[in-house]
Amino acid sequence: MFFKKTSSLEVEETDTRSGKDAIWMITSILFTFLLGGFVFWKSMNAGIQYLTTLVPLLLVIAFSGTYFYNRSADMRMFAAFTGLAAIGIALQVIIDAQYQVISQFSMVKYFAGLAIAIVLILMYRLIRKALNFNYTTYFLLVVAACLYIALLFFGKDTNGYGTTAWIKIGPVSLQLTDFAKITAILFYSSLFSARKTYSNRSILILSSIFFIVNFIGSVLIHELGSFYILYFLHLSMLYI
């Protein structure tokens, strides 16, 4: 759990631990600065781009870190989250500096994404309740298989790399492997729901079947990039 429950008997322990928690927050801030030096060493242009994101990143770390710190959250996990976010930003700016990025801003896509985000936030409680039902786990397993079957028969290679990860619906192109990632997150959330009583054996069997479905589907559509993400997600959910 991200948040720790404290009782009156743990107050003294919490006070002694607060110093270590503060160190983790400071460490995450220092890491973002040190990472900036590495980015500058790799590319001056990438370093300048990283600096433009450093200020809002530090503000997010400071405000969110203070929020979680005051609620006795696991600051080691918070430091890991912020570190991974900083590494992701650093890698992206380095890649952008190495390759010519062609982008096109679309107001339709912007508002469509915003609308989807709002709908998902409003439907959070409904989604959370649905994940608690036993049949939801099996349903999501079937959904994952159907996504790969659809890509196998109707998938398109839009970038010329041999990966049939896209499907066209009229003028709209969708990358269904992204939906496979979302399905995976929902599947593991349902599998490890606190209201379910799956045995360790059942969890291992169901997660292995889901893993095999994604592996076979990724091989058939020649999309191992997305599979590596699902692979590490599978390992982290089982062992972490």
Image (cartoon, rainbow, N blue to C red):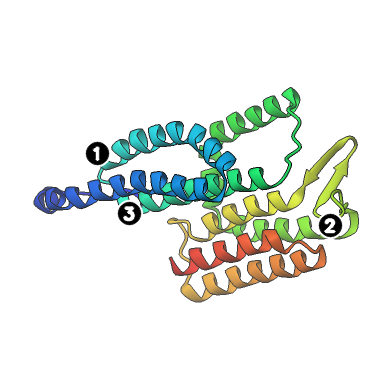
As drawn, is 63 to the left or to the right of 239? left
Q: Position of residue 116 (x, y in %)?
A: 65, 32
Q: Position of residue 121 (x, y in %)?
A: 54, 33
State how far apart marks 2 and 1 are (Cα). 49 Å
| Residue matched to label 1 | 70
Q: Position of residue 220 (x, y in %)?
A: 81, 67
State how far apart marks 2 and 3 are (Cα). 40 Å
Residue visible at 73% across and 29% down in the picture: 109
49 to 237, vertically: above or below: above
**Disc on res. 62:** none
| Residue matched to label 3 | 76
State how far apart marks 3 and 1 are (Cα). 14 Å
Q: Callout 2, which amino acid?
A: Tyr
Question: Is the N terminus in the top left, top right, bottom left or bottom right quadrant?
Answer: bottom left
State yes or no: discs 3 and 1 in contact (Cβ < 8 Å).
no
5 to 228, vertically: above or below: above
Residue visible at 31% across and 48% down in the picture: 3
**Disc on res. 161:** 2
Work out whether mark 2 precedes mark 1 in sequence or the reverse, and give the earlier one.
1
Work out whether mark 3 precedes mark 1 in sequence or the reverse, and give the earlier one.
1
Around disc 3, counting alpha carbons within 10 Å, would you say few (fewer than 14), some (14 to 19), or many (20 or more)? some
Q: Nearer the viewer, residue 36 or 118?
A: 36
Residue visible at 86% across and 48% down in the picture: 158
Secondary structure of residue under mark 1: helix
As drawn, is 119 to the left or to the right of 69? right
